[in-house]
Amino acid sequence: MTEPVRTLTVEEHDRAWHAIEGAEDPDPGTILNAVLRALRINAPSAEDEMAAILRKRTAA
């Protein structure tokens, strides 16, 4: 496991917790997106995800 980059503030934790509680769809992707929105964090773009997949393939 990697070391944490930082610790959530109490306010961030509260927003994330309420985003999870308020998610009507139990799909993990829906919940993750709700938490990211609550924390004002952008998810990686499709291009970023594809680049990461390609890097993993070439590293193996």
Image (spheres, helix red, strand yellow):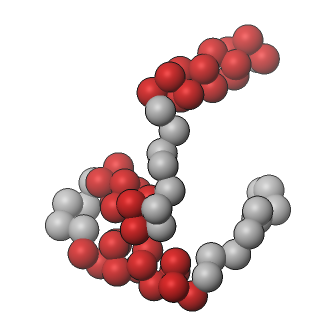
Q: Where is residue 42 in the image (x, y as percent from the top left)?
A: 48, 49
Q: Where is residue 45 in the image (x, y as percent from the top left)?
A: 47, 33
Q: Residue sitting at 34 percent across and 72 percent down?
A: 20
Q: Residue sitting at 70 percent across and 75 percent down?
A: 7
* In the image: residue 43, left or right of residue 58: left
Residue 13 lies, with reference to residue 2, above or below; the image says below
* In the image: residue 28, left or right of residue 14: left
Where residue 14 sits, quadrant-wise, is bottom left
Residue 37 lies, with reference to residue 45, above or below; the image says below
Q: Position of residue 9 (x, y in %)?
A: 61, 82
Q: Position of residue 51 (x, y in %)?
A: 60, 20
Q: Which residue lies furthest to the left in this view?
A: 24
Count the marks: how many? 0
Please state which of residues 48 and 25 is positioned toward the viewer in this rendering.
48
Q: Which residue lies furthest to the front in this view?
A: 40
Q: Residue sitting at 78 percent across and 57 percent down?
A: 1
* In the image: residue 44, left or right of residue 2: left
